[in-house]
Image (cartoon, rainbow, N blue to C red):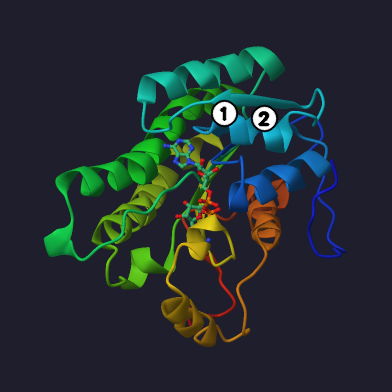
């Protein structure tokens, strides 16, 4: 499958590796999974939306496996990871990208909307990481790349649940990076900014304000996030761990 990304000079080679991407049925996750597939990897896409998975990946061939899984369900995630290892023999790279928003100011936020966002982002990142690390540890190498957000570092009105989850992912990234460094596993995060369905849900006036605040003047295409993930997942990034790499057009300056 040809990744629908901007003309690129940088080429990655993940032939022989298995890359697991959550939330890969659309948006940033799909762009990330497509780049790894183009780069020769076996790709396992986990997403809760079975129809979208089939539409995005149904024709992709025998280097792709899809699993309709809610990442908030740690048992289902563990079973999917075992199925992926049975399929290809390993999980070399895990990308924790699946996410949702349930925005409103904190005094109007229901406990259910608080919990759902924490469960998907933070719970999902935990569930995948705990399931893949034993396999990476046995292999003596591995890469985990988490997806956080500007909001997780700076806050954003209406997103107390999302900010708490994304801030938690940064703390989780640094802690697990310290825990697994001795096994040859790195754990990093990206902080993206891309035009996806999640961004399309933002009201037009707020979106115009957000776009105006991007030094590079635009939201990226989802595929533009993928090269940063591939770099962090590469052998060349073996001495990079515990970092948050903004891929955000400069908003975090
Ligand atoms: N788009 C941006 O500018 C931006 C900015 C900062 C952070 N992010 C983060 O990037 C990630 C991807 O966002 P996106 O913009 O591509 O969103 P998106 O809504 O386009 O895609 C999210 C994907 O995750 C899947 N998903 C949602 N809940 C799930 C669950 N419980 N289990 C499995 N899959 C689930 C969805 O089905 C969908 O395919 C998210 O973690 C988001 O918070 C995005």
Q: Is residue 5 left or right of residue 125?
A: right
Q: Residue at x 20, y 66 (%)?
A: 105
- The image shows residue 65 at horizontal and vertical percentages of 68, 24
For the residue pair 30 and 230, the one nearer the viewer reads as 30
Q: Which mark is residue 50?
A: 1
Distance from disc 1 to disc 2, alpha carbons, whole Å, reads 6 Å
Asked whether the viewer can see residue 92, the reply is no
Q: Does residue 95 lie above or below 253 as drawn?
A: above
- The image shows residue 231 at horizontal and vertical percentages of 68, 55
Q: Does residue 197 lie above or below 151 as drawn?
A: above
Secondary structure found at label 2: helix
Q: Is residue 145 left or right of residue 174?
A: right
- The image shows residue 244 at horizontal and vertical percentages of 48, 62
Q: On the image, which quarter does residue 74 sit in?
A: top left
Q: Residue at x 16, y 46 (%)?
A: 111
Q: On the image, which quarter does residue 92 sit in?
A: top right
Q: On the image, which quarter does residue 85 sit in?
A: top right
Extreme residue toward the left, this view: 107
- The image shows residue 147 at horizontal and vertical percentages of 49, 53
Q: Is residue 144 left or right of residue 107?
A: right
Secondary structure found at label 1: helix
Q: Which mark is residue 54?
A: 2
So how many labels did they put on this image? Answer: 2
Q: Residues within 10 Å of mark 2 (few under 14, many from 20)?
A: some
Q: Which mark is residue 64?
A: none
Q: Is residue 169 left or right of residue 109?
A: right
Are dots 1 and 2 in contact, CB under 8 Å?
A: yes
Q: Residue at x 61, y 40 (%)?
A: 25
Image quadrant where one finds the N terminus: top right
For the residue pair 154 and 235, the one nearer the viewer reads as 154
């Amino acid at each position: 499958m040809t990744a629908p990304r901007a003309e690129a000079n940088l080429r990655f080679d993940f032939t022989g590796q298995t890359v697991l991407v959550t939330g890969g049925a659309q948006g940033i996750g799909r762009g990330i999974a497509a780049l790894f597939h183009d780069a020769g990897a076996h790709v396992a896409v986990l997403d809760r939306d079975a129809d979208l998975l089939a539409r995005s990946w149904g024709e992709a061939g025998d280097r792709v496996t899809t699993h309709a899984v809610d990442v908030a369900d740690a048992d289902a995630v563990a079973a999917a990871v075992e199925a992926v290892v049975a399929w290809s023999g390993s999980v070399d790279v895990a990308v924790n990208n699946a996410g949702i928003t349930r925005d409103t100011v904190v005094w109007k936020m229901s406990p259910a909307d608080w919990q759902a966002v924490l469960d998907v982002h933070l719970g999902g990142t935990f569930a995948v990481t705990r399931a893949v690390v034993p396999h990476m540890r046995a292999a003596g190498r591995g890469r985990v790349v988490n997806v956080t957000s500007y909001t997780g570092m700076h806050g954003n009105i209406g997103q107390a649940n999302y900010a708490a989850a994304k801030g938690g992912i940064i703390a989780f990234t640094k802690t697990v990076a310290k825990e697994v460094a001795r096994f040859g596993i790195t754990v990093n995060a990206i902080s993206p900014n891309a035009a996806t369905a999640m961004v399309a849900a933002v009201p037009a006036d707020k979106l115009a304000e957000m776009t105006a605040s991007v030094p590079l003047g635009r939201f990226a295409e989802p595929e533009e996030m993928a090269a940063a993930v591939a770099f962090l997942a590469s052998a060349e990034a073996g001495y990079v761990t515990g970092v948050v790499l903004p891929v955000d057009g400069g908003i975090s300056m």
